[in-house]
Image: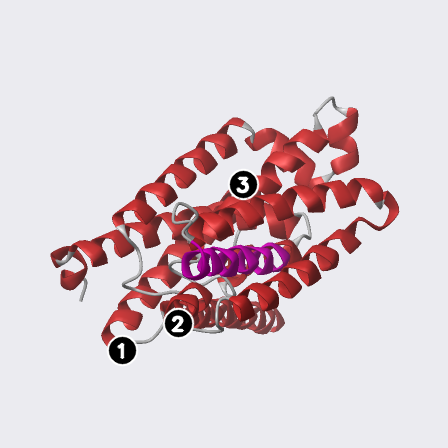
Amino acid sequence: MLHDFFAFDFLRNTFYTGLLIGLIAPLLGTFIVVRRLSLLADALSHVTLAGIAFGLFLEKKTAVSFITPMYGGMFFSVAGSIFIEKLRGLYKAYQEIAIPIILSGGVGLSVIFISLANGFNTDLFNYLFGSVSAVSYNDFLSILGIAVVVVILIVLFYKELVVLSFDEEHASISGIHAKRIHLLFIILTALVIAASMRIVGVLLVSALMTLPVAASMRIAKSFKQTVFFSVIFGELAVMIGLVSGYYFSIPPGGTIVIASIIMLLTVIGYKSFQKNWLKAGNKQ
């Protein structure tokens, strides 16, 4: 079934990009879920959509060609992540309010720029829900660069991120530069969301960052196992989405999300069966 993905250059780009997204999205998603910042991905995805719409607007209405929708989405996403961090500093007692503020701003800007760019079209639809054929070689190289940076920084700051995820106050007392690490983390999240939009779609990428983690947490016995299983579930979901998207001519983003939900329900069902079976055995 994967023969076509290696026979055509554009599908090969999509396949390799999918593998990268299946790795880095759940990898960062593990830290996001543990820190109870699941809505952060939703907020940044809407800001990214505003950047995409802005890029489409520039392409259609001006002679500016170096700001593509993808790079526009990355810029807006990173800017949104920095604004979230600034707002968290202003509202120290109500830090979670920063997320809906940025989310609302992203939605508002998206509506404006989509209207200015003459509304919905095929390009915007692909960015919203993903596409099997929309990944160019340059896109692949950009996402490869982001993936390398994300993996390297996660490895370098793994201990700090783990401590910060479970106890931010203890991290600060221990001498860890909590604000700097968190800013770095949120910028990486923004870049991963922007990079994932070609495959999963900007409105569905948050699911790829949370659903595999939710499934992993039901069977993992440690944080490292949670990371490992999250990546496995993420890769499986992406591969299922790409293959089904190609052969059934549907956006892969929706299938990736459904595959992730099925995996989650399967794990929940397995753990429930295991628990009931053990109870029944103990009674006997």
Rounded to the nearest whole Å, what is the CA distance between mark 1 and mark 2?
11 Å
- The picture places residue 152, in percent across and down from the top left corner, at 45, 31
The residue identified by callout 2 is: 255
The structure residue drawn at horizontal position 56% and vertical position 49%, both measured from the top left corner, is: 77
Q: Nearer the viewer, mark 3 or mark 2?
A: 3
* Residue 167 visible in image: yes
Q: Magenta region's main secondary structure?
A: helix
**Relative to 207, is 34 above or below?**
above
Rounded to the nearest whole Å, what is the CA distance between mark 3 and mark 2?
25 Å
- The picture places residue 73, in percent across and down from the top left corner, at 50, 52
Disc 1: CA contacts within 10 A as few (<14), some (14-19) or many (>=20):
few
**Relative to 113, is 194 above or below?**
above
The residue identified by callout 1 is: 248
Q: Amino acid at mark 1?
A: Phe
**Relative to 204, is 99 above or below?**
above
Q: Classify residue 89 as left or right of residue 49.
A: right
Rounded to the nearest whole Å, what is the CA distance between mark 3 and mark 1?
33 Å
Disc 3: CA contacts within 10 A as few (<14), some (14-19) or many (>=20):
many
Disc 2: CA contacts within 10 A as few (<14), some (14-19) or many (>=20):
many
Q: Is 54 inside the magenta-drawn segment? A: yes
Q: Classify residue 183 as left or right of residue 281.
A: right
- The picture places residue 115, in percent across and down from the top left corner, at 55, 70
Secondary structure beneath dot 1 equals helix
